[in-house]
Image (cartoon, grey):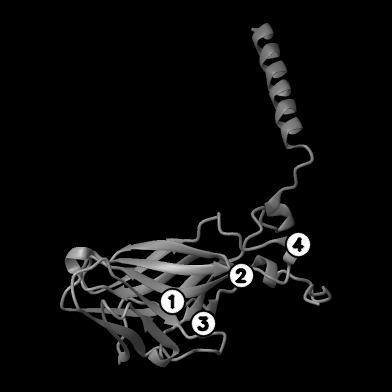
Amino acid sequence: MKKIILLTLVLTVAFSGIIFAQNAGEPNAAEIGVSSAQQKLKEISISKMEDAGLWYGIMPADEGIMQLRRFEASPLDKEPIEGEEESGIVEADDYVVGAKVSFYRRSMSTFSIRPIRPLPVEGIAKTISVWVAGRNTNHVLQLEISDHFGNTAYINMGKLNFVGWKKITVSVPPSIVQRDYHYYNKMGITVEGFNILCDLDETYGNYYIYLDDLRAVSDLFAEESRDEDDLIDAW
């Protein structure tokens, strides 16, 4: 019995030594109050899409006619951004942007809805979302973005085969470079607009699509953790 107790004590001490050796020199994030991931994710507004005059449409002239208008409407399930009211800066959110396309004939057509100027996204974007009423078609919504070097990327947001409003969210692929410490004054992405890739069987008559409330979830760690006395490398 004494031998068994002694063996148990030896194994316990040895096991504790292994654990201590593995953890030695590694700081405890909870004790120092810093997240080891070094991220500060926050939902931000890119555009509430209140004014159709700040957007324009593009479509091949031989495939159809495109019009843009604003309408007083809003998705009922849409929720305000957390902390927006407390900040004291609340933008009006009463309108949506609508596009009407009148097709001349069936074709593998594509049309675009673009802002007058590209929309910069603060921080390092993780996801992009937009509310869409796509009228239950097989057309595909595509997000067009560019990085700070002007490289363009296209992200498929999915088919528009649903009824009513739906919030569509996509992740920004890690292959898109948003930060390079050799160019610290250039970071993040800009939204160039939306492309609608039309399904051949759906390109006849009139088609309507409505967009509202373009948002992003971004990592603002670099912006909000900068020391007050730090210099900005933009000279």
Instruction: Identify which amino acid the numbered label 3 is placed on.
Output: Glu
Q: Position of residue 26 (x, y in %)?
A: 75, 43
Neighbour class for label 2 at 10 Å: few (<14), some, many (≥20)?
many
Q: Nearer the viewer, mark 3 or mark 1?
A: 1
Q: Earlier in the sequence, mark 4 or mark 2?
A: 2
Q: Give the structural element (helix, strand or loop) at label 2.
A: loop
Q: What is the C-alpha distance between the residues marked 1 and 2?
A: 15 Å
Instruction: Examine the rendered structure and indicate whether residue 28 appears above or below residue 142.
Output: above
Q: Is residue 211 left or right of residue 122?
A: left
Occupied quadrant, residue 79: bottom left
**Residue named by callout 2:** 123
Mark 4: give few (<14), some (14-19) or many (20+) Cα within 10 Å: few
Mark found first going from the N terminus, 1 or 2? 2
Question: Which residue bears the numbered disc 4?
Answer: 182
**Position above or below: 224 against 210:** above
Query: Disc 1 vs disc 2: Cβ atoms closer than 8 Å?
Result: no
CA distance for labels 3 and 2: 17 Å
- Disc on res. 84: 3
Q: Which residue is mark 1?
A: 214
Give the alpha-carbon distance from disc 4 to disc 1, as whole Å.
Answer: 30 Å
* Residue at (70% x, 58% y) in the render: 34
Which numbered disc, 4 or 2, marks the residue closer to the eye?
Answer: 4
| Tag nearer the camera, 3 or 2 | 2
Q: Mark 1 or mark 4, which is nearer the start of the sequence?
A: 4
Q: Secondary structure at mark 4?
A: helix
Which of discs 4 and 3 lies nearer the camera? The answer is 4
Against 33, is 146 above or below? below
Tell me what residue is drawn at x 18 percent, y 74 percent. 105
Q: Position of residue 52 (x, y in %)?
A: 38, 90
Q: Tell me which label, 4 or 3, sits earlier in the chain.
A: 3
